[in-house]
């Protein structure tokens, strides 16, 4: 190779080396909030085990001391964040907990509000140097990631007339969107609010209009997701009276849907995809796919299909979409694995639940992790062809149901069960 051709070849090789080096050194994306970077229960990681050896991935470490609670973990900037009720009986407090990712040592704990019988449900949301968490009594706190020092506080009941539809108290994980911190007090004039994420100052409040008799007033147990349906940035939430959407810009109410609402507990996050929103609830409510359309100067939600509670309903644990299909656990206090075609609702397969209780589900590298509330964890191939279990194991268990959602970060699976947090190797190296 000589002359210009040689120089061109060397340049191409150098460029390829830079690209490959950059790819090799690329940082692992954080898991900074509930259900992952996009709140959809999906991890973009690849190179994970397609079959768990002897049914069980290798346990890397296990720690205790997280206290009572159903919060799962967020992982960002080399730290793990969660919540738990800590302290001795009679002097407990609901706390945000920060741990070093490498050593698992507690870095700091910050009290948020009073304890609850079964602890907090919120997973902290991390945004740069700040994080946000909500206690079961409606205490919203913004704290410094480095130190845990509280920057500002709000209380849903005191500041917004907030309420929850039923007895299980506030369970939301707050959303950061640009400069806004968005959450769901459930108040008459402040069903959903947007606050300045640095100061806590109110940007807008949205009072949800009368949607009918279905359900009950107030917040439910879901967390807000973002939609860009019809080119309008909007916040979609599963509330006590139905699934609603409000404009991100100014909080104006856009649309509501009540057919899958119940009066006990509306729990799963809506799932958004393009101009579509999939919604599901338990207690015979069933599921529906909505198509969001322009309607004059506003928007409307048209029902594409509805599945009754016998066909598919998710109690809690959520659903995920892989390819053209949606996957989740079906039934009240059950997690029977189901695969259905997203756009039609056609059931591709439905299997007997491999364990008792509800199941939390996430998706990564063509597979699903089903974590059952009684403890078992299953690896299931995400394919509409057939139900294929690729591994199952029984992790150490804590007290009560194992409801915290599993998390996948940097080739590792994180499982919390009350006081315990466990980390498993999903790469097999």
Image (cartoon, grey):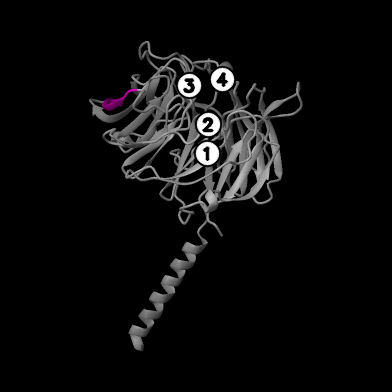
Name the residue carrying label 4: 169
Label 2 and label 1: CA atoms lie apart by 8 Å
Name the residue carrying label 2: 173
Residues packed near mark 2 inside 10 Å, few (<14), some (14 to 19) or many (20 plus): many
Residues packed near mark 4 inside 10 Å, few (<14), some (14 to 19) or many (20 plus): some
Question: Would you say the residues marked 2 and 1 are in contact, meaning their CB atoms lie under 8 Å apart?
Answer: yes
Name the residue carrying label 1: 33
Q: Is residue 319 left or right of residue 324?
A: right
**Magenta residues, dominant SS class:** strand
Question: Would you say the residues marked 3 and 4 are in contact, meaning their CB atoms lie under 8 Å apart?
Answer: no
In terms of depth relative to the viewer, which is nearer, 416 or 245? 416
* Residue at the left extreme of this rendering: 296
Where in the figure is residue 21, as x and y percent of width and height? 49, 67
Mark 2 or mark 1, earlier in chain: 1
In terms of depth relative to the viewer, which is nearer, 54 or 62? 54
Start and end of the magenta stretch?
299-308
- The residue shown at (71%, 45%) is 105
Residues packed near mark 1 inside 10 Å, few (<14), some (14 to 19) or many (20 plus): many
Q: Element type at marker 2?
A: loop
């Amino acid at each position: 190779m000589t002359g210009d051709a040689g120089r061109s070849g060397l340049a191409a090789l150098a460029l390829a080396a830079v690209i490959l080096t950059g790819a090799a050194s690329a940082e692992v994306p954080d898991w900074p909030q509930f259900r992952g970077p996009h709140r959809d229960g999906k991890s973009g990681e690849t190179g994970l085990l397609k079959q768990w050896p002897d049914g069980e991935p290798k346990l890397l470490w296990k720690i205790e001391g997280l206290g009572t609670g159903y919060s799962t973990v967020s992982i960002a900037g080399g730290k793990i964040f969660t919540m738990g009720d800590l302290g001795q009986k009679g002097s407990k407090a609901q706390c945000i907990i920060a741990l070093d990712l490498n050593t698992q040592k507690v870095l700091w704990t910050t009290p948020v509000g009073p304890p609850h019988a079964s602890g907090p449900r919120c997973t902290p949301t991390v945004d740069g140097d700040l994080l946000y968490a909500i206690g079961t009594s409606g205490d919203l706190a913004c704290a410094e990631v480095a130190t845990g020092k509280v920057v500002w506080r709000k209380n849903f009941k005191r500041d917004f007339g907030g309420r929850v539809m039923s007895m299980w108290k506030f369970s939301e994980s707050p959303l950061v969107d640009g400069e806004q911190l968005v959450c769901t007090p459930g108040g008459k004039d402040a069903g959903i609010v947007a606050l300045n994420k640095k100061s806590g100052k109110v940007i807008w409040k949205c009072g949800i209009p009368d949607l009918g008799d279905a359900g009950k007033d107030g917040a439910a147990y879901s967390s807000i997701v973002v939609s860009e349906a019809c080119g309008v940035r909007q916040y979609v939430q599963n509330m006590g009276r139905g699934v609603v959407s409000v404009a991100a810009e100014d909080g104006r109410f856009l649309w509501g849907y009540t057919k899958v609402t119940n009066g006990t507990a509306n729990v799963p996050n809506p799932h958004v995809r393009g101009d579509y929103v999939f919604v599901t609830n338990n207690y015979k409510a069933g599921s529906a796919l909505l198509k969001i359309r322009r309607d004059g100067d506003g928007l409307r939600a048209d029902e594409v299909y509805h599945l009754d509670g016998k066909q598919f309903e998710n109690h809690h644990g959520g659903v995920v979409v892989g390819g053209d299909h949606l996957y989740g656990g079906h039934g009240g206090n059950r997690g029977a694995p189901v695969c259905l075609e997203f756009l039609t609702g056609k059931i591709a397969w439905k299997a007997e639940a491999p364990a008792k209780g509800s199941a939390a589900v996430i998706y990564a590298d063509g597979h699903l992790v089903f974590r059952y509330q009684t403890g078992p964890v299953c690896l299931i191939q995400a394919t509409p062809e057939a139900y294929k279990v690729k591994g199952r194991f029984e992790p150490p268990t804590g007290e009560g149901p194992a409801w915290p959602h599993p998390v996948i970060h940097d080739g590792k699976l994180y499982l919390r069960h009350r006081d315990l947090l466990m980390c498993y190797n999903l790469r097999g190296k």
